[in-house]
Image (spheres, helix red, strand yellow):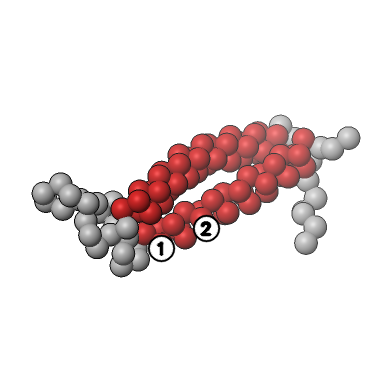
Amino acid sequence: AEQPTATLRRELAELDDRRKAMEAEMEGISEALRASNMGGVAGALVDRDGFPRADVDVHATRTLRHRLACLNTDHKALMQQLEAKLHAMHAALAAGAPPPPPPAA
């Protein structure tokens, strides 16, 4: 039978891999939004008269901003899961469970 701490370590590693992939995608989107024909992460997409800016790809900017907002929400939930697993790992170790062997490289 697998030790509880070994299971937690494996789950933590999987969550951390998802976190890293999510953060990499978020950084890529932020970089794409900084391009000269995009509206940035939070810049105005309309001019002072309320018309779409001619120098900005409004549709692409809105699409990327939406994906970034979804990723930010998912990232927050993932970080809460990671925090809960870390607390569980420390509680298991404090309760005297033997530490799991280090992961194989």
Residues at badges 1 and 2 in contact (C-beta under 8 Å)?
no
Image-quadrant location for residue 94: top right
Location of residue 45 in the rendering, given as x and y in whole percent from the top left corner: 24, 51
Q: Which residue is mark 2?
A: 24
- Left or right side of 44 for 86: right
Q: Nearer the viewer, mark 1 or mark 2?
A: 1
Label 2: how many residues lie within 10 Å, few (<14), some (14-19) or many (20+)?
few
- Left or right side of 60 for 91: right
- Residue 57 lies, with reference to residue 92, above or below; the image says below
Image-quadrant location for residue 3: top right
Location of residue 84 in the rendering, given as x and y in whole percent from the top left corner: 58, 34
Location of residue 101 in the rendering, given as x and y in whole percent from the top left corner: 80, 50
Which of the image's four quarters has the N terminus? Answer: top right
Would residue 101 be visible to someone looking at this image?
A: yes
Give the residue type that dot 1 points to: Glu
Residue drawn at x 57%, y 36% as measured from the top left: 81
Would residue 94 be visible to someone looking at this image?
A: no
Callout 2 secondary element: helix
Q: Which residue is mark 1?
A: 31
